[in-house]
Amino acid sequence: MPSEIRGTERSLFIYIFLFLWLGLFSLFEAGIIKDIRQPAFLSLAVTLAMLLTHLLLEKWGVEGDLLLFPLTSMLNVAGLLMILRLSPEFAERQFIWLFVGLAAFLLTVKGLNNYKSLEDYKYIYIFAGLFLLLATILFGVEAGGARSWIELGIVRFQPSELVKIILVIFLAGYLEEKKEILAEGTRNILGIPVPSLQYTGPLLVMWGLSLVLLVFQKDLGTALIYFGTFLAMIYISTGRWPYIFTGALLFSLGGLLGYLLFAHVRVRVAIWLNPWIDIDGKGYQIVQSLFAIGSGGIYGTGLGLGQPSLIPAAHTDFVFSAWCEETGLLGAAALILIYCLVIHRGFRIALTAKTGFGTLLAAGLTSLLAIQTLVIVGGVIKLLPLTGITLPFVSYGGSSLVSSYILLGLLTKISAEDGA
C-alpha cells in the first residue's frame, strides 16, 4: 500500500508542476507578465524545492499520510499563480516565503523526534504564546483596522498566526489531562454535571484571550478562529454540548461588546448586512467581490483575462474571489474540494492516532484549518462578516504560509508515528 500511495503522490506532483507552468504561460500570453524570465526562474525554483522536499521525505522514510503534502502544494501553486497575476511585486515575496515555509515543514518533520513530547511542555508554550500576543498589543502596528503586526526592520510578521498552533498544542495537552473531569463534572447544577473552577479556569482564560484579541487588537477574524477551534476541541474531548452552547453565548457577548465599543467592528457588521448602501465607500470591496464571483460564471473568464484587480487587496483578503472570476464555479469547487480532502485526511489522522494527545492535536489542527477556510470564504461571499484573514496556503502572507506549513508538518509527523 505505501508503494501505491508513493506512486499516486508522484503522479500528483506531475500534475501540480504542469499546472504551474501552464498557468505561467497563460499569464504571459494574456499580457499580465511582460518579462517572463524572472517568474520562470522563480517557478523553476519552486518546482525544484517541492521536488526536493518530496525526495527528502522519501529518503527519510516518512510514511503516514503521503497525500497531505501534494494536496497542499496544489493549493500553494494556485495561490502563487493568482498572486503573480494580481501583484507581481507581492508574488516575489510570496515565492520567498514559500521556501521558508518548506524549510519549516521539513524542520518540523525531521527535527521533532517525538510529537508526544510536546505534551510535556504545554504550559511553557501557552506562556510563550501569551507573551507574543502581549508584545503585539504593546508594540504592534495597525493594518486594515487590526493591530496584529510586529515590524522588525524590513520584516513584518503576525504573531497570532504562530500562536494559533501554540494554543492548539496547549489545549490538546490540557484536555487530554483533564478530559474525564471535564466530561463528568465534580458537582451538579440544575442536574447538569459541572467541573469546578480549578479545572475550567484555563478554559475560561481562552475565552478571555479571544476577548482581549477583539478588544485590544480589534481582530475579529483571529478571535473567531481561536474560539471556534477551542470549542471544537472541547467537544471532541468531552462530547458534551453544554460546553458548546455556553462558549457560543460567551463569545456572542464578547462580540456584542466589541460591536458597542469599536467603530471598526460596527462597520464590518453593517457592510455584511447591506454593502449596497455605501457601494462607493466601505461596501466597495465586498460588492466588487460579489461582482467578480458572478462574472466568472461556470467556466470562468480564463486565467489573466478577468478584472479581479478592481477588488482592493485582492491578493490577500479576496484571492478566492479573484480565483472564482477567472476559473469559474468549476475552479472554485475544485479548490474547495482540495480543502475538503485535506480536512478529511486530517480528521482521519486524528481517528487513527494511538494516543489521546495525538487525537486531540490532529483534530485541533484540522479544525483550525477548516474554520479559517470557512471564515474567509464565507466572508468574501457575504455569508459571514468579512474578517480580513488569509485563505490557508493560497492568500498572500508570509506569517500565514509559514505557520500553515508548520501545521502540515505536525499532521504529517502524527500520521508517520502513529501509522495513519
Image (cartoon, rainbow, N blue to C red):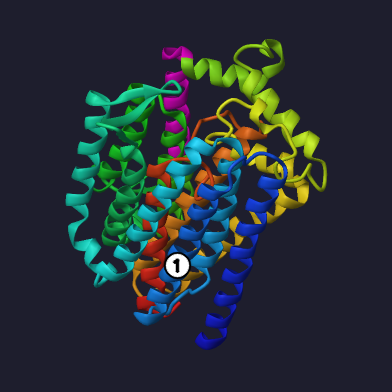
Quarter containing the C terminus = bottom left
- Quadrant placement of the N terminus: bottom right
User: Which residue, given by chain and number where applicable, does mark 1 sit on?
Assistant: 350
Taking the spot 73% from the left edge, 47% from the top edge, the residue there is 327
Is residue 260 rendered magenta in the image? yes
Amino acid found under the numbered disc labelled 1: Ala
In this rendered view, identify the residue nearer to me: 167 or 163. Answer: 163
User: Quick check: 403 left or right of 385?
Assistant: left
Pinpoint residue 78: horizontal percent, then vertical percent: 60, 52
| Residue depicted at 41% across the width and 13% down the height | 261
Classed neighbour count for the residue bearing mark 1: other residues with Cα under 10 Å, few (<14), some (14–19), many (≥20): many
Q: Position of residue 266 (x, y in %)?
A: 52, 16
Q: Residue at x 42, y 44 (%)?
A: 400
Magenta stretch, overall SS: helix
Q: Between residues 331 and 22, which one lies in front from this camera angle?
A: 22
- Above or below, 317 against 370 in this view is above
What is the span of residues highlighted in magenta in the rendered image?
A: 246-263
Q: Does residue 407 appear to the left or right of 391 in the view shown?
A: left
